[in-house]
Each structure stands twice: as structure tokens, then as C-alpha cells.
Amino acid sequence: MTDPSFAARPQGGGTAPCDERAVFTAVVYVLTSGCAWRHLPPTFGTSPATAHRRFTVWTEAGLWRRLHRAVLDEPGARGEVDWTSAIIDAASVQAKGGTLTGPNPVDRGKKGSKLHVLSDARGIPLAVAVSGADLHDSQAFKPLILAIPTVRSRRGPRRRRPVKARADKAYFSADHVAWLRGRGLVPRIARPGIESGERLGRHRWKIERSIA
């Protein structure tokens, strides 16, 4: 993928392209460590500006979504993606700013983000979304189900539909139950005041491990 910032100058000159692998490694480091772009260590061999610029270009091109699908295809082809259930959960994290932040209702209104994750029955993340911390969990329910990608199978065509959808009482509504059944999925959502979270707890630890 060519970065527009490296286009040849009109005089015929140009800037030598950076090593793509080095830039990718730097971007992944920032995304996984929480390091600010401006504090990117020089040992990665690329400047913070170049790393951030490439991240923006790759994001707009849908690179991360394609990489996620390619990664899922590996266990899918080995039959290691467990489609018996899709488990949905969310976790709030601290965030200093940006468009995907909001006042956290469980942290004295401090700014934060919320990570929404849908995994298979083993805890392998199939769909991920980020929102402001003030977004109610239930609002991410349908988008996560619809975002499940088609994954390679050990035998037969690619697959994207689990058998059951498991979630805690924060996701319960008559609309969600009917919507799942209309799509051929078995709803397993705890009902407020009727079912405790203990039954989901046997499955929930798998996705909590993924979020952590």
C-alpha cells in the first residue's frame, strides 16, 4: 500500500520509503501498549508522524478488518472456531480524549471508552467495536451480531452464524429475543429479576479473558 506522503516531488526527487514491516510493528506497539504516538521509541526505526500517518491510511483502507478475517481463517480451517455459541460482553477502559470517548457512569463521569466484543464459544474474538463509555451495552448487540465475518470451515462453505447467542441481562429485551429468533439464532440472554448471571458465568469467563 503506497502512502500518499511518499509521492515523488515535481522536481524528480522523492523520499526514500520506510520499511513497511518496521512501520507496521511500530503501529501495533502503539495500539497494544497505549503509548502516545509522540512517545514512540526511536528504536522502531520510524518517526511518530510516519507511523500515525500509515495507521490512518491503513484504517481508511480497511486493513485491520481484512487482517482480522485472515487471522480467523487459520483456526477456522482447522475446525477450531466453536460456533455452538456467540458470547457478547463489554468492558470500560480509561481514555483521555477522541471521538470514541464519553463520561463513564461507573467512574464518576470520567472520560472513557467501552470495548464491545463478540467471541465464539472458546473466547476467540469474532467482532469488536469501540464506543464512548456512556453507550449502553445493549446498543452494540445487533451491530456485533451483524459484524460477524464469514470464516473458513474445515469442511464445506465459509460460516458466520453461531447456534446460540449468550449475553447477560444488560442485553435483554423482547426485541433482541425476537430478532435473534428471526435470524435463526437461539437466544440465551439472562432476564432481569428472573435469572441470575451464574448460568452465563460458566461461559462468560472465556470472553472476559479475551477482553482482558
Image (tube, grey):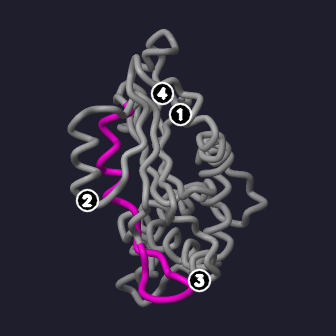
Q: Secondary structure at mark 1?
A: strand
- Sequence-wise, the earlier of marks 3 and 4 is 3
Q: Secondary structure at mark 4?
A: strand
Tell me the amino acid under the disc marked 4: Gly
Q: Secondary structure at mark 3?
A: helix
Q: What segment is highlighted magenta in the picture?
A: 137-159
Contact flag, marks 1 and 2 (Cβ < 8 Å): no
Q: Nearer the viewer, mark 2 or mark 3?
A: 2
At 42% from the left and 43% from the top, the residue drawn is: 188
Residue 171 relative to residue 1: left or right: left
The residue that disc 3 covers is 77
The residue that disc 2 covers is 183
Q: Against 29, is 191 above or below?
A: above
Contact flag, marks 1 and 4 (Cβ < 8 Å): no
Mark on residue 112? 4
CA distance separating discs 3 and 1: 30 Å
What quarter of the picture does the C terminus occupy? top right
Q: Nearer the viewer, mark 3 or mark 4?
A: 3
Tell me the amino acid under the disc marked 3: Ala
Residue sitting farthest toward the front? 194
Front residue of 34 and 45: 34
